[in-house]
Each structure stands twice: as structure tokens, then as C-alpha cells.
Image (cartoon, rainbow, N blue to C red):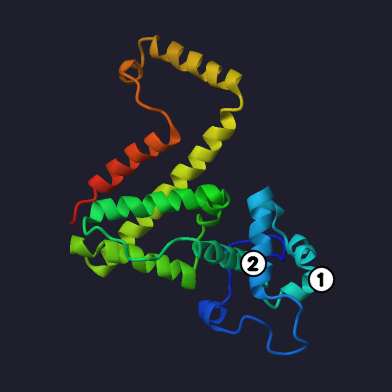
Amino acid sequence: MGTPDGGSGATSVDPQELWLGPTRPRRGRRPTFSREAITAAAVALADAEGLDAVTMRRVASQVGAGAMSLYSYAPDKETLLELMVDHVSGELPTTDDRTGDWPTDLKAIAHLQRAHMLRHPWLPTALSARRTPGPNTLAFLERALAALRPTGLDGAAKLEVFAQLTGFVAGHVAHEIAQAAAAGSPDRAAAEARYLAAVAADGHHPELAEALAAPGRPLTPEATFNRFLNRLVDGLGTD
């Protein structure tokens, strides 16, 4: 188990206890806050300041409680992250609006995930560790599996496809966020462009020179995401 304000790996909390057990302590006075309020406060902190800002002490101060009183709800930061991920997953639509064309429906799911992660920039990092799907996450997973039904893939393969898609979106959004931050440093971008031009002209990297000489493509975040997504989904097939 990790430290209260840190985390050294996977949480030791039983998933059944976390998601199917009571949402408040069984004993003692009825608290003035709830697990929902604690989780919402943690999400607000992460949205505003990043995951590093999310400590039990900071969250406790947001809900007007002592840090020790929060441990009955989330004994460590890993457990709190589990709650946070599922909390924001409740924003994802789960209505059945499939077209019946699974590549189209899968791409629509990826676009929903991208928009969701851009609203919560800490999510790609939080998802990099194994998470136990809570009720909101499971509801969205159900939608994705339904979209994959026309593929004829077995259940294990459909779960793998969804995991691959989610991993792609998380990695792309993390890169997108980093690129947006780097765009605030035009001098650095210009220096990188000069460096690559010099390397391409040295005669030792003909493949790179050819690639850099190719006609440019739209570089907006949306266009780039669409190109990568199309290559991923269109290459999945149904094997």
C-alpha cells in the first residue's frame, strides 16, 4: 500500500469492497462529507493543478475535514485515483447510438475519449496504471463492446481492442498536451527545425531527408488525431 499522500504501486483495496461495499464508514457519527464529495474535490484539484496537487491533506481541506478522517473512504492515493477515474467516467455518454458500421462507431468512441481526456489532462497519467473499472467505467465499456459486436470477434479480443484504443488515445492526448505546452516556446521549435534540416542534409540519413521533403499535411490537433486514429482502426480488421 502506498503512503497517504503518495502511492507505491497498485492499491491493495479489494475491488468488490471498493465498488460494491458501503460508500461511508459503518461505525461512528455520520460524517459531514461523502465519498462523492471527496472524489469531486480531488478531481477539481487535479483539473486545476495536476495530479501532484492531489494529496489527502489538500483534499481534506477542500471538504473541511481532517486528513485522517478521509482514510476510511480512500486509504491511499491509489484508491483515490480509482475513485477519480470512475467519477469522471460518468461524463461519458453511454446511450446506444451505433450506426452498425463498427469502424465508424469505434472512431466515435475514440473521439469521445479524446475530448474527455483533454477536459481532464491528468487522466492519461492516471490511466497508465492498472485500474479496476468502476460502475461508470463499466457502462462506457459496455457501449464499446456493443459497438464491436458486428466484428464477430470473441469477448477477449473485443476487450483487447478496447484496451488498445484507450491506450492509443491516452498516449496521443499526453503527447498533444506536451506539444501544446512546447508551442509556447517558438524559439525551441525553430531550433529543432534547424537541427532536423541540418541532419537531413548531412547525407547520412537519406530516409529522414526524403520524409522531411514530402508534402506537408494539416498539423491541427484534430487532423493529426484523425490520421492516426484512421490508421489504427482501419488496420484492426476482424482476425
Residue type at tag 1: Gly
**Considering depth in this image, is 221 or 132 the residue closer to the camera?**
221
Residue 138 in the image: x percent, y percent? 42, 70
Residue at point 69%, 55% (across, down) = 45
Other-residue count near label 2 (Cα within 10 Å), few / some / many at <14 / 14–19 / ≥20? many
**Residue with the mark numbered 2:** 39
Other-residue count near label 1 (Cα within 10 Å), few / some / many at <14 / 14–19 / ≥20? some
Mark sitting on residue 5: none
User: What is the total number of numbered labels drawn onto the structure image?
Assistant: 2
Q: Locate the N terminus by quadrant.
A: bottom right
Residue 163 in the image: x percent, y percent? 37, 58
Inspect this view and state whether residue 133 appears.
Answer: no
N-term mark: 1 or 2:
2
Asked if labels 2 and 1 touch by Cβ distance under 8 angstroms, the answer is no
Q: Is residue 187 above or below residue 115?
A: above
Inspect this view and state whether residue 91 appears.
Answer: yes
Answer left or right for 228 relative to 72.
left
**Considering depth in this image, is 132 or 49 the residue closer to the camera?**
49
Residue at point 50%, 65% (across, down) = 90
Residue type at tag 2: Thr
Comparing marks 1 and 2, which lies closer to the viewer?
A: 2
Residue 158 in the image: x percent, y percent? 28, 63
**Residue with the mark numbered 1:** 66
Answer left or right for 1 relative to 224.
right
Residue at point 31%, 65% (across, down) = 145
In three-dimensional space, the C-alpha distance between marks 1 and 2, rounded to whole angstroms, equals 15 Å
Residue 87 in the image: x percent, y percent? 56, 66
Secondary structure at badge 2 equals: helix
